[in-house]
Amino acid sequence: MARHDKEASVREEVCVDPVREGERSESRKAHSPRTAAQALGDLSEGLSALIRGQFMLARAEMRQEVRAVARDAAMELVGVPIALIGYLLLMFAAVAALALALPIWASFLIVAGAHLLLGLGAIAFGATRMRKKRLGLPRSTDELKKSKSLAQTIGREKPLPVESRQLH
């Protein structure tokens, strides 16, 4: 699935529509001057919608990641038994070839020792890579950073007009 399609499906799963939220706040502004209590209510409502949207985005993104991992794991599981049978037959052929020059016990010992070393090396390599790898939510992280910077700039803007600051 293309990156654009994934982003579109994540956006569809997130219910908060910033355009509609902006239209609602614009219609509220057009009716009458707001009191500080109304402004705080709108701010609280906006923040809760923002947080809810962030959680929904993270959940949708994580769901997509889990589905992709599950699909890949299923494909690997289909091939494992087939590959193991082929590998086992190949190793018996290697033992049989070595048995032409060495005793059969020595042939099995050489093949088993080589497999032990290769297997331990593969385990160590995989464990090292797993320690370095992190699962992340890049779009959710970006959205949280944007929200944080927006929240920081809100406090720096000019104060509300005097009539809006009065509590009724």
Image (cartoon, helix red, strand yellow):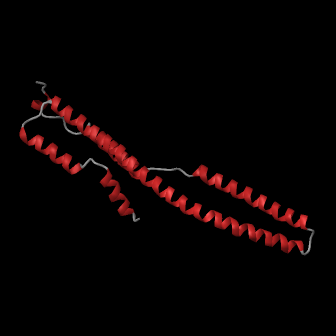
Q: Horizontal and vertical percent for residue 103?
A: 93, 68
Q: Is residue 104 left or right of residue 162?
A: right
Quadrant of the rendered image containing residue 48: top left
Q: Is residue 84 left or right of residue 101?
A: left
Q: Horizontal and vertical percent for residue 142?
A: 38, 50
> On the rendered image, what quadrant is the C terminus found in?
top left
Q: Horizontal and vertical percent for residue 30?
A: 8, 42
> On the rendered image, what quadrant is the N terminus found in?
bottom left
Q: Is residue 68 above or below residue 15?
A: below
Q: Is residue 150 above or below residue 94?
A: above
Q: Is residue 86 left or right of residue 109?
A: left
Quadrant of the rendered image containing residue 27: top left
Question: Seen from this angle, which residue lies furthest left?
Answer: 31
Disc tally is 0
Front-lying residue, 79 or 32: 79
Q: Residue at x 61, y 54 (%)?
A: 129
Question: Seen from this angle, which residue lies furthest top?
Answer: 168
